[in-house]
Image: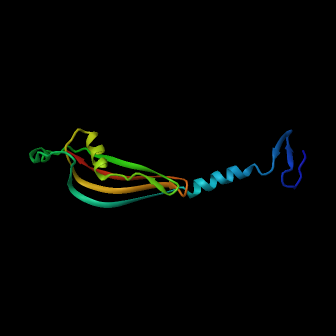
Amino acid sequence: MTTQGCAGARVVIAGSPVRLGSWRPLALLGLAVATASGCTGTTGHLALASTRDLDLAAIEKPSGRRVKGRSCIHVVTVVPIGMPKFDAAIEDALRQTGGTALVDVVVGYEVYDIPFVYGLACYVAEGEAR
């Protein structure tokens, strides 16, 4: 077994050479994972939300199924590629059941990112589909 303390020196452990300094890419990966962050928050509450024509009589019938829809955008470095749309989040939720409205709606905003590298920002609409 051979070891030397100089930077860039080769270390032979059990017959396989290992280059000192090979820990740096792993350290950078660990730093990136450690700085990855996310944030969620409630933007508001609505009694009723829809992007379609409504028949108010049909809304009275409870479906009992809560659904969640999202409208997301990508953020590259610090530049957003578009804007998330609240109506697209509602439409995504309604598409799951074929309903015409959401009742007892909770509107939220979610952000997940690795600072100054890449991120994802979403409006989230969750409610009971009718």
Q: Residue at x 17, y 45 (%)?
A: 62
Looking at the picture, tell me which residue is in the foreground, 67 or 109: 109
Snapshot colouring: rainbow
Q: Nearer the viewer, residue 88 or 59?
A: 88
Position of 10 with respect to 28 (left or right) is right
- Residue 52 sits in quarter: top left
Question: Residue 95 in the image: x percent, y percent?
Answer: 27, 40
Q: Residue placed at 23% from the left, 38% from the top?
A: 98
State left or right for residue 67 relative to residue 109.
Answer: left
Quadrant of the image for the C terminus?
top left
Q: Position of residue 5 (x, y in %)?
A: 87, 55
Residue that appears at 86% across and 47% down: 10
Q: Nearer the viewer, residue 17 or 114?
A: 114
Where on the picture, by quarter, is residue 108? bottom left
**Quadrant where the image shows the N terminus:** top right
The total of numbered circles placed on residues is 0
* Residue 104: % across, % down: 23, 54
In x, y percent, where is residue 112? Answer: 47, 54
Residue at 9% over, 46% down: 57
